[in-house]
Image (cartoon, rainbow, N blue to C red):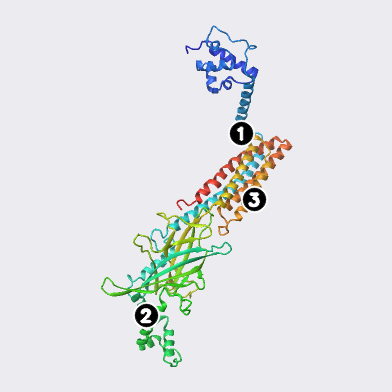
Amino acid sequence: MNSQVGKRTREKLVALDRFLGQKHGLPLYRAVSVSQSRMDDVLSGREEPDYRLCVKVAAYFFIPVDVLTDDSKDLPSEEVIQVDEDLVSVQRNDVENDIERQKQKRFISRNWKMIGYRKRVKLILSVLVIAVPLVAYIIFCASEVAFERFDDMRKYRIGSDGLDYDMYDPIQVKYHDDLEGTSKANKPDAHYVEVTVGAVLEKIKNISSATSSYEGRMQLYFKFDKDEFREMFRHYARNVLADQIIEDYYAENDEAHPQGAFDHDAWLDEHSDYFETWVETHDSEYYPGETPSNVLTDKNTMFVIGNGEFVPDSLGTLKELEEVQYYDEEGRLRTMCYQKIRFNATFEKAFDSVRYPLDSVQFKMYILPTMDADYIRYVPDRSTDSEGNLISGFTPYFSVTSGYRLIHDTEDMDNFTMRLNYYYDENNDPAIDYEQSVRTQLEIIVRANRAGLSLFLQAFINLFSVVIWIIIAFYSQSYTGEDSIGMLGTGLFGVMSSMLVGLSMVSDAGIFSLITMINIFTLAVIMIMTYQAIAAKRAAVRKDKVLIAYNGIKLRVLFVLLTICTVAMFVVIPALAYMWGV
């Protein structure tokens, strides 16, 4: 027994608890703000009262503490005992609220008993009709975002690790393996020439929202061995240009061309001196960096844009043909040729912008030689300057217009990548095996982000506020029985405002973008809430307790469901869409 309290202390506390409950409807534990379990233990004798508890009780009833602790003193009569009526009123209301909260915790189980079997089946089916499409839609959006992000990350890593082709594409792998089989290492009599190709970008501009194109200003440079090229060209001239060579011969010698068919190889062998002279005279016209100019308009461009076309009158030579002689490993004198040109080209949009604007975009440009891989094979230039930086890349004044900025280089992702693909022109004669018409294709990839997110954030925050407003309306309707129909007008106005903001964004964003996903979700939430609010109000007007219970259960289930879905749409999916480190 606590020496500070008497043997009758518990008896006196029991009397005060009974008095407070009978006269004021308030339990003693709430009056002195202690836990109900502790007060029950004290009043039942399982725990001895302590002096501090006695001090609290005595102060509440305006009596000296020794009245409770001294066994020789009795409690005042109930007519004499006083309490603070205002305090009692506040505490009693709090107890009532607590009781109501306890009822609300068992709301579904209590109301479930009020509805019959048919209503229960209807309730389950109606919740499923709403829940299944909504959850399926969110899973679909999440899968779209996750797959696109995974695919983008995979694409971004291709090239950053030095791969010259897409090793995930089985067609590219087959082309690569086939060409490796015909390489000079495996086939000494192969006659192709390898051309080292590099690119320097000056600007990406005119990213048009009205069309599916953008314009790039760039420089290309080509490096190749002159002796290897002439050896290749000799074979090319004999097999492809024979008719032209023969026509030139008879035109130059003012002789009539023989009528009828004849053996080209025999003719070329017979006129071998003319053939060799023609090759040496005309080989430079077929160099990989040859382009027409305003002066030499009859020259051919020896490369093409795979996904676009040249801007007229934009081709210009930056470096006339430069020849550098050197000795190879076997001591033979060789000649390396170097050409550099500048041009503008309009490219078809070949970049991903699915989840504007959290995702990065890839501007893709394709450069192909006019000759197939039997004669010309591109090799991306990965040489570096004295500081270890790639020679290919961007000029110091490079820029991307229309609100883009380059991503930051990371270990896994570069803002500039060149890699080699293998291209087969399906317009060729289908009777020809594709191995005979494969062309190496230089793919130039520039990766950028949207520079400004203001429009996106405006729409996103607006939509998020709308959904939170609807969730609050759901809570009010579900837990307090308030009529929330009046709140829906504000939500509908908010979502319409966000849709207008979304429409004002540049239209090169993917049609099914992140904002579109959230817009559809928000409209669905408003429609669900509107229907349920009207149904709940109709039940209240009819005073149908079974229907009220039915709608009450349904509202609470949907409130939890929509809260979880909202977190998924506005937190999980944007997190999936965001490209970390870029």
Q: Nearer the viewer, mark 3 or mark 2?
A: 3
Which circle, 3 or 1, is nearer the viewer?
3
Classify mark 3: residues with Cα within 10 Å, few (<14), some (14-19) or many (20+): some
Q: Earlier in the sequence, mark 3 or mark 1?
A: 1
**Residue position marked by numbered label 1 in the rendering:** 109
Q: Nearer the viewer, mark 2 or mark 1?
A: 2
Left or right of residue 287: residue 48: right
Q: Is residue 494 visible in the rendered structure shown here? A: yes
- How far apart are labels 2 and 1 at the CA level? 91 Å
484 or 140, which is in the foreground?
484
Cα distance, mark 3 to mark 2?
A: 69 Å
* Secondary element at image label 3: helix
The vertical placement of 308 against 265, above or below, is above
Label 1 sits on what residue type?
Answer: Ser
Q: Which residue is mark 2?
A: 234
Which residue corresponds to mark 3?
496
Q: Residue furthest left?
A: 331
Residue situated in front as seen by the camera: 289 or 139:
289
Examine the image and state in which quarter residue 391 appears.
bottom left
Query: Looking at the picture, which amino acid does disc 3 mark?
Result: Met
* Helix, strand or loop under label 1: helix
Res. 182 image quadrant = bottom left
Residue 538 is situated, as x and y percent measured from the top left of the image, at 72, 40
Q: Marks 3/1: CA distance?
A: 39 Å
**Residue 43 locus on image (x, y percent):** 55, 17
- Callout 3 touching callout 1 (CB < 8 Å): no
Q: Earlier in the sequence, mark 2 or mark 1?
A: 1
